[in-house]
Amino acid sequence: MSCFTQVRGSPVWHWDLDKEFGMRVMNGIRRAIAGGAVGASMLIVGQTAALADAPATAEPSWCQFWEVNVTIEPGGAATGHRYADMLIQNDSDNDCSVTTKVGLRLLDAEGNQLPTRAVYPSETPEPVTLEPFQTAVIPMEWVVVPTGDEPDDGPCQPEPAAVDVDLPGNAEPQPEWNVVDWTFGPVCNKGTLKLSPIKVKA
């Protein structure tokens, strides 16, 4: 209940709230504030739980060096350029993945490393998954004319006899496993091999 009261000695009348009514109003305000805080807390907890439950990105099941067979097939030619396809076949009974970012080392006939530089696509290469006995293709390109300080009165670089291919995702390189014969002559520009994005062979 509420009523008008007049302070003794004052001509002014005041509007006074009943104490019980005032308490009910204040309690309602407190409950509303507390409810909002609880709701916000529940929202934060729910979002945190959702993030915790989100699946982590799985690491690909990389092809291991003993599971594949690597070969190189000659491709076309253009003025000053040569092309070939690196073929990586999954010889295992399980699916496995590989990317363009293979390690390469040109070797001479005695197995000594020659100047080699692999150039990969500018974007991070996406892995491809190979089913058993499926093959991936990495197109390769290099130049056969001298560049920079390379001699122009003879071979621009020593002629490789082989190329060693190390697969990504292997803990320890195996230099004597996937060594492929190289029959395409010298690789100019200090052994630069440009690799295009990997794809599964149709």
Image: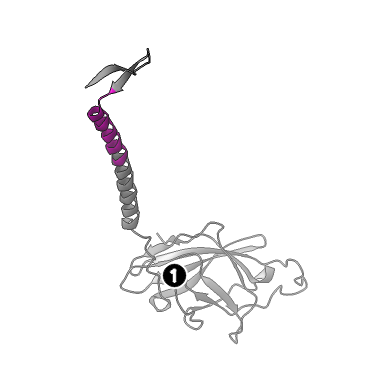
Location of residue 11 in the rendering, given as x and y in whole percent from the top left corner:
37, 12
Residue shown at the point (34%, 53%) measured from the top left: 48
Q: Relative to residue 73, is residue 25 depicted above or below?
A: above
Residue shown at the point (46%, 68%) measured from the top left: 87
Location of residue 13 in the rendering, given as x and y in whole percent from the top left corner:
34, 14
Residue at the farthest top position: 11
Location of residue 167 in the rendering, given as x and y in whole percent from the top left corner:
47, 73
Residue 65 location, quadrant: bottom left
Q: Which amino acid type corresponds to the residue marked 1 in the rendered image? A: Ile
Helix, strand or loop at mark 1: strand
Residue 21 location, quadrant: top left
Location of residue 37 in the rendering, given as x and y in whole percent from the top left corner:
33, 43
For the stretch drawn in magenta, what is the main secondary structure? helix
Which of these two is toward me, 34 or 139?
34
**Quadrant of the rendering where the N terminus is positioned:** top left
Residue shown at the point (51%, 75%) measured from the top left: 165
Residue at the farthest front position: 9
Q: Relative to residue 85, is residue 180 depicted above or below?
A: below
Q: Residues within 10 Å of mark 1 (few under 14, many from 20)?
A: many
**Would residue 154 appear left or right of 136 to someone viewing this image?**
right
Magenta includes 14? Answer: no
Residue 24 location, quadrant: top left
Task: Identify residue for label 1.
Answer: 88
Magenta includes 26? Answer: yes
In this picture, which residue range is highlighted in magenta? 17-34
Which of these two is toward me, 161 or 167?
167
Residue at the farthest bottom position: 110
**Would residue 18 appear left or right of 202 to someone viewing this image?**
left
